[in-house]
Amino acid sequence: MRFGRSAVVEPDGADAATSVQTLAVLLQAGAVPLVAWRHLAETGDRHAASVVDRVASGTPLLAAIEAEGGAWADLAAAWEIATTVGAPLAEVLRMIAETLRDAASAADDVRIALAEPAGTARLLLWMPFAGLLLGFALGFDTLGVILGNPLGGACVVAGLLLVVAARQWTRRLLKKARPAPGTPGMRAELVAVALAGGASIDRALRLVAESAVSGAGEEERVRTVLDLSRAAGVPAGELLRAAAAQDRHSARVQGRLRAAKLSTRLLIPLGVCTLPAFLLLGVAPLLLSVLASTPLPL
C-alpha cells in the first residue's frame, strides 16, 4: 500500500546549496557566469547541465535557472536582483547557499519526524489483508465463503471500501502535515540583498515582488521588519536576515509539532476504518466459514 511521493517529499535545497556555493567560489575566482555554470555542469551536476543546455538552445540564463523550479527559482530571483542593483554576485550567492542549506536542514528535520507516523500508517493499512491471509493459512474455506455466500461477499466489499477510505484519509493527513513549499525567509533575504546593493526600500520591495521568489505570504512580515528599522533607526539588512533566520527556525519547530500531532490524528482513521476493515476482511469470513462447516443439530 503506497502513499506515493506526496506523503513525504525530499527537499532539493541541500543539493542546490552545494551547487550555489560552488558557483560563488567560481565567480569570486574570476569566472564569468556562463563559464561558471559550464564548470559546474562538468562536475556532474544535472541541474547545471540542464541550465547550460537551455542556454545553448537560446534561453536566457535567468530563465534557464528559473525553469529548474524549487530552490533554483529562488536562486534565479537572487541572481536577477543582485545584477539589477549591482550587489556583489559572489557574496549574494554565498548568502543564498547558506539560506538554502539552513532551510534544507529544517526540511530534513520535518521529513524525518514525519517518516515514523507515515511508516506506521502504511503498515497498519496492510492489517485487514493480513487477517484475510491468516484465514487461508489456517485452512478455513474463506474463499468459498467469499464467493459462495452473499454475506461473505458483502463483508469483503465493505472491508475493501473501508481500506480505500482509510488510505485516502491517511494521505490527506500526511499531506496536511507536510511543510509548505518554498524557502522560509527567502523574501526577507532578497529584500536585504536589494538594500545592500543601494536600492531604496520601495524599489527593493518592487524588485522582490516582481521576481519568482517563493515564500508567498511573507510580505507583511517584511514590512513589519522595515517599519521597525525606520522606528529604531537601525540598518534594515541585519534585521531582515535575523527575521529570515527566525522564520526558518519557526518552520522547523512547527513542522515537528505537526509531526507529533499526526501520530495522534492517524488513530482516527485506524479506529474508524482500518479496524472495522480488519473485522470484515479477516474475522467475518473466518466466522462464516466456521458456521458453514458446523453441522446443524437434529
Image (tube, grey):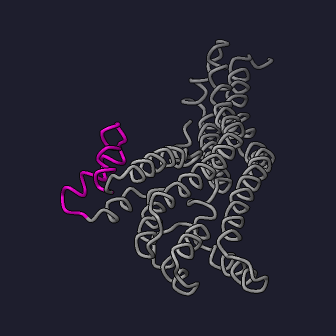
Q: Residue at x 18, y 58 (%)?
A: 57
- The spot of residue 215 in percent (x, y) is 58, 67
Q: Which residue is drawn at 42% across and 53% down?
A: 28
- The spot of residue 225 in percent (x, y) is 71, 77
Q: Residue at x 76, y 81 (%)?
A: 228
- The spot of residue 33 in percent (x, y) is 33, 57
Residue placed furthest toward the left: 57
Q: Is 114 located above or below residue 215 in the figure?
A: above
Foreground pick, 16 / 24: 24
Pick the quarter of the image with the N terminus: top right
Foreground pick, 162 / 169: 169
Q: Quadrant of residue 185?
A: bottom right
Q: In which quarter of the image is residue 249?
A: bottom right
Q: Is 79 located above or below residue 157 in the figure?
A: below
Q: Is 9 located above or below residue 222 in the figure?
A: above
Q: Residue at x 69, y 60 (%)?
A: 245
Foreground pick, 182 / 90: 90
Pick the quarter of the image with the C terminus: top right
Residue placed furthest toward the front: 30
Q: What stretch is highlighted in magenta?
A: 33-59
Q: In this view, does 68 lie to the left or right of 274?
A: left
Q: Is residue 69 left or right of residue 146?
A: left
- The spot of residue 289 in percent (x, y) is 68, 22
Q: Which secondary structure class fits the magenta region best?
A: helix
Q: Say whether residue 17 is magenta.
A: no
The total of numbered circles placed on residues is 0
Q: Say whether residue 51 is magenta.
A: yes
